[in-house]
Image: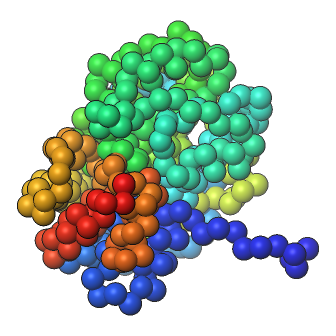
């Protein structure tokens, strides 16, 4: 069975990190995988997380299994963070949350659940989208289709084409939407555009599936809910995959959640019971540590305030990096107006670099960028920005 196979290709994002680690060039730069980095190029542990971990370790009394859907405290805190504690959806018990292994685990549990309920549906993803989205849904057996999103000419959102396509999506299909900090473009919908999308979803009868991996990284914890709240106001049903990798820095803890919203409490409870059967035959129940960190912080006003201040600092650092990057591009003679980079949200920017330029930067300059030109701006520092921009200037002849 294992004798006649060629190796699978490396992951388009995580494979870059492995190549970067093995690169001996002292000037190497990793702008691929989406992790926050400080000015020293490190991905730090938040102080609020360290304090919560110390408390958990000192007070723990068991290593027993978690419930299939995770600890009740965690599940409640996730819902309150997503919607706001007083939201009518929560008051009506229309939302149920499962603790999953990261945001990717949430997407896959949701995909397997939807395949069980609607096996002939198609899943629509933005063009472009995160490299793993298609793989997750195709792995669950779905056909995937695309709706327009990014306008390369304006470096912004092609909303008219997006809405036109979504207005033709058949009832019963599934549309994957990025809640904020769109990966890979950094281009987000406005509050008004979200309301228009929600109205189309309600009218057409397709199911929204919201990928909410970056709450707090766009404009703020509350502001980044705009898309979710628009859907909650218009749509009787939708799913949310959320993650604490970025906003808590819990990358290696794989801490995420799948939240199912139904038309009423009875429908939600029945559907969520099927989500638990999906979980049971996959990973049985979630790992505890990351969820304990999150619930310990969110459940204590002092710890939560400290975490929120650290989240603001990360968001502001990324905004400052964008400004620095744009100025350095101009200073190094890279032609064009790159102000669009400062208007984008979150870690990522669609740089406009061609595949030939990306190849040149990787092979000749040890600068690792995902194919298509997506840059993790959080990987840019004051120490490497001049080398990066000078190298981009060198690559211009390869367009």
Q: Residue furthest front?
A: 397
Q: Is 187 displayed left or right of 130 in the figure?
A: left
Q: Position of residue 208 (x, y in %)?
A: 53, 28
Where residue 244 sits, quadrant-wise, is bottom left
Q: Is 20 displayed left or right of 238 in the figure?
A: left
Q: Choose between 306 and 149: the one closer to the eye.
A: 149
Q: Is residue 202 above or below residue 144?
A: above
Q: Is residue 276 at all visible to an observer of this figure?
A: no
Colour mapping: rainbow
Q: Is 23 displayed left or right of 277 in the figure?
A: left
Q: Position of residue 110 (x, y in %)?
A: 62, 42
Q: Position of residue 262 (x, y in %)?
A: 57, 25
Q: Is residue 159 above or below residue 281?
A: above
Q: Choose between 37 and 60: the one closer to the eye.
A: 37
Q: Position of residue 382 (x, y in %)?
A: 13, 71
Where residue 64 sits, quadrant-wise, is bottom right
Q: Choose between 365 and 238: the one closer to the eye.
A: 365
Q: Residue furthest top?
A: 203
Name which residue lies at 91% across and 74% down.
1
Name which residue lies at 26% across and 67% down.
394
Give the total of numbered labels.
0
Name which residue lies at 40% across and 48% down.
184
Q: Residue furthest right?
A: 1
Where residue 20 sits, quadrant-wise, is bottom left
Quarter of the rendering occupied by the C terminus: bottom left
Q: Choose between 86 and 179: the one closer to the eye.
A: 179
Name which residue lies at 63% across and 50% down.
135
Q: Is residue 187 at all visible to an observer of this figure?
A: yes
Q: Is 65 displayed left or right of 193 in the figure?
A: right
């Amino acid at each position: 069975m294992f004798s006649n196979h060629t190796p699978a290709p490396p992951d388009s994002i995580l494979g870059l990190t492995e190549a970067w680690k093995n690169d001996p060039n002292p000037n190497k730069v990793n702008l691929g995988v989406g992790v926050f980095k400080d000015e020293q190029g490190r991905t730090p542990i938040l102080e609020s997380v360290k304090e919560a971990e110390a408390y958990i370790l000192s007070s723990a009394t068991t290593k027993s299994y978690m419930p299939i859907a995770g600890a009740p405290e965690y599940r409640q805190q996730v819902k309150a963070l997503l919607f706001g504690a007083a939201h009518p959806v929560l008051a009506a018990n229309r939302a149920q949350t499962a603790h999953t292994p990261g945001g990717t685990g949430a997407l896959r549990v949701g995909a397997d659940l939807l395949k069980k309920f609607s096996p002939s549906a198609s899943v629509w993803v933005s063009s472009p989208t995160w490299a793993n989205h298609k793989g997750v849904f195709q792995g669950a057996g779905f056909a995937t289709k695309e709706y327009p999103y990014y306008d390369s000419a304006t470096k912004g959102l092609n909303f008219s084409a997006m809405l036109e396509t979504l207005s033709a999506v058949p009832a019963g299909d599934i549309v994957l939407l990025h809640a904020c900090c769109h990966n890979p473009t950094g281009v987000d919908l406005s509050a008004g555009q979200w309301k228009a999308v929600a109205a189309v979803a309600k009218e057409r009868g397709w199911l929204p599936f919201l990928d909410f991996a970056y709450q707090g990284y766009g404009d703020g914890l509350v502001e980044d809910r705009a898309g979710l709240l628009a859907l909650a106001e218009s749509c009787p049903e939708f799913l949310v995959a959320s993650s604490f990798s970025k906003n808590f820095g819990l990358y290696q803890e794989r801490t995420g959640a799948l939240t199912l919203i139904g038309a009423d409490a009875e429908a939600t409870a029945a559907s969520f019971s099927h989500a638990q059967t999906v979980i049971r035959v996959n990973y049985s129940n979630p790992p505890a540590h990351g969820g304990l960190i999150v619930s310990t912080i969110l459940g204590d006003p002092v710890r939560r305030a400290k975490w929120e201040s650290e989240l603001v600092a990360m968001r502001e650092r990324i905004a400052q990096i964008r400004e620095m990057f744009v100025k350095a591009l101009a200073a190094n003679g890279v032609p064009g107006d790159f102000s669009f980079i400062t208007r984008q949200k979150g870690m990522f920017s669609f740089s406009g670099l061609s595949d030939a330029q990306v190849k040149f930067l990787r092979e000749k300059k040890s600068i690792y960028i995902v194919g298509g030109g997506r840059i993790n701006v959080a990987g840019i520092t004051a120490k490497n920005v001049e080398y990066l921009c000078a190298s981009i200037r060198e690559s211009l002849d390869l367009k």
